[in-house]
Amino acid sequence: MHQRSCKVIDDVEEELQQQMTDALNEQICDDNVQSAEDAVPSLNAQEIYPDLKKGIKLPNRHYNVTTQEIKKCINTMATVIYNYFSDNYGFVDANNNNEFESKYKSCSAKELKKVLKNLKCKNGDLKEIKFVAKKLRCLLSKNNTDLQHADVNASDNIDHDKLFNNNFWAYFTKTLSAVIPNKTFSIPSWIPKFNSPTTPFNLDPPTYNEITNVIRKMKPSGSPCPLDQISVICLKRCPYLRTYLTEIIHAAWSSGIVPSEWKKACTILIHKKDETDNPANFRPITLESVPLKVFTSCLRNKIFAFLSENNYIEHDIQKGFTPNVAGTVEHTAHRAHIINTARIKQRSLVITLLDLKNAFGELHHNLIYKVLQYHHIPDSINELIRSLYTNFQTSIITEKFSTPFITVGRGVLQGDCLSPLLFNMPFNTFVQHIKSESFLQLGFWKFNKTGIPCNPIHWFQFADDAAVISSQEKENQILLNRFSVWCQLANMIIRVDKCSTFGIKKHHLNLFNINLNCLLATYLSPVPKLVNLSATLVVILITTCQMKNTNRIYVTCLIISYLK
């Protein structure tokens, strides 16, 4: 047994040794073959060598744009963006719809609907579909009257150069020119002064994150300025351009001077009503440069944050241009509640609606600077705004024609992101005056559940539109007198033809014997030497009668107009 076991072990060892010897011989053969294949061939002149590039320096995050380089950097950025998109994507053809215009010139709305349906079914030309759809919307629009069609069809026969030189150029030059440019303004003593600010103004230039947030909130559908054609979409999608713009804004902020390249804009005209040869029947829309809008948006955010943190601005009365506040809805709902309360409770109510003549365009620049001081805005920010409003120019343009640049000498800059806040600040001085207890008592009092009067409402303001609310005509007249005095100080003009007064008054009369003479004394009396607000009157007379021992309320609306 032992001998058999030893023999088996010897056979296994011999077999294992033979296998290891064979494997070693195969490895030696493979190494010889691989060494033969790895032999280096001789160099050949036709071989291709790598082309190594020299190392480049990457730009730092901060470019350190100096004051002297601002103009160069602005022009460089505008030129690079414009050339890139024009070279790669071409230009907008303004006359690409001429063939469609002649093709569908005489088509009716019914025919255009059939054409549009066929084009969509057959997957027609996208440009033709857009043109037909737009023309159909114009025909179906209620605002598109036959007179407007006649003006559009006859526009080819108008001498635009002569029309602009004779009418539009003279009108807008006069409208935008400064009136008494050296006039000084002072805050009267009856307007309360603000205390010193508890929270200081943040004078640091806007950061990259602040600028990025501003750009992200801007609408991508906004039209670019025709002077540089820079769309906000470029800044939205390119962080490198935002970084470059940040350095330009830092340099302009530190210098306290707005670059002159940003202080040029273009104004287009939108027809409102009546004849097209009258410039007053057009609404001007100004297109500013997108970098300037970003700059003024950052400036607006800092000023608004300072005013809000120090409680310098009123949000209960003034609802216009207030962020995150649905001012129109609040004022409308509140007025409706007051009118309904007066009707149900049979209480007297007088409401006067006020309108100012071209309020945004008549605001004096020196008044803006004075109001900035009144709100404790630092001098450096005041000078920055003064630089923005100094020699700001715009050109009135159409599709084919344009006027020379016109200097904007009065009014807030249209299309500018800072203008709404600058417009509200002068009105805030008047709001601070009428919010005192003596004027609050003149308003319409509410009653709580226990019947105690509380929370009087006397004034609603939305930008330049105001609603004066009181229980009696005399109280309403006192508030109107104060507003007239403030308008004289601010060089504002009240449009009497756009103002109206209406109210609710309880009167005991026989149902069938209504004395109309009693209404003649209910309208607001003219303001002596200030403004006559009796142009329009709407009086709601509530009469009470006895019928079968039951009180019934009858409401009769009588409209009396007093034309000057």
Image (tube, rainbow, N blue to C red):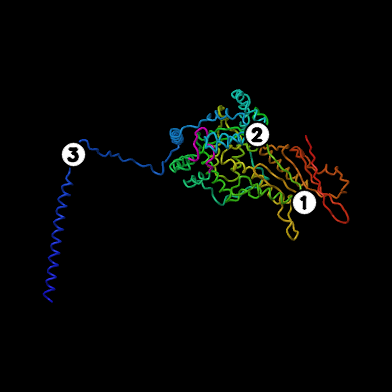
Neighbor class of circle 2 (other Cα within 10 Å; few <14, some 14-19, many 20+) is few
The CA span between labels 1 and 3 is 106 Å
Give SS at disc 3. loop
**Was residue 226 drawn as part of the magenta stretch in this picture?**
yes
Q: Which mark is residue 43?
A: 3
Residue 265 is tagged as none
Q: Quadrant of residue 1?
A: bottom left
Q: Tell me the kind of residue under disc 3.
A: Leu
Quadrant of the rendering where the C terminus is positioned:
top right
Q: Main secondary structure of the magenta part?
A: loop
- Upstream in the sequence, badge 1 or badge 3? 3
Write the residue at 28% across / 38% down.
51
Q: Mark 1 highlights which residue? A: 343
**Answer yes or no: do the residues labelled 1 and 3 have beta carbons within 8 Å?**
no
The answer to whether 63 appears left or right of 475 in the picture is left
What amino acid type should be assigned to the residue bearing mark 2?
Asn
| Stretch in magenta | 218-233
Q: Visible in this render: residue 224? A: no
Q: What residue sits right under mark 2 in the picture?
A: 144
Could you say which is closer to the camera, residue 253 or residue 219?
219
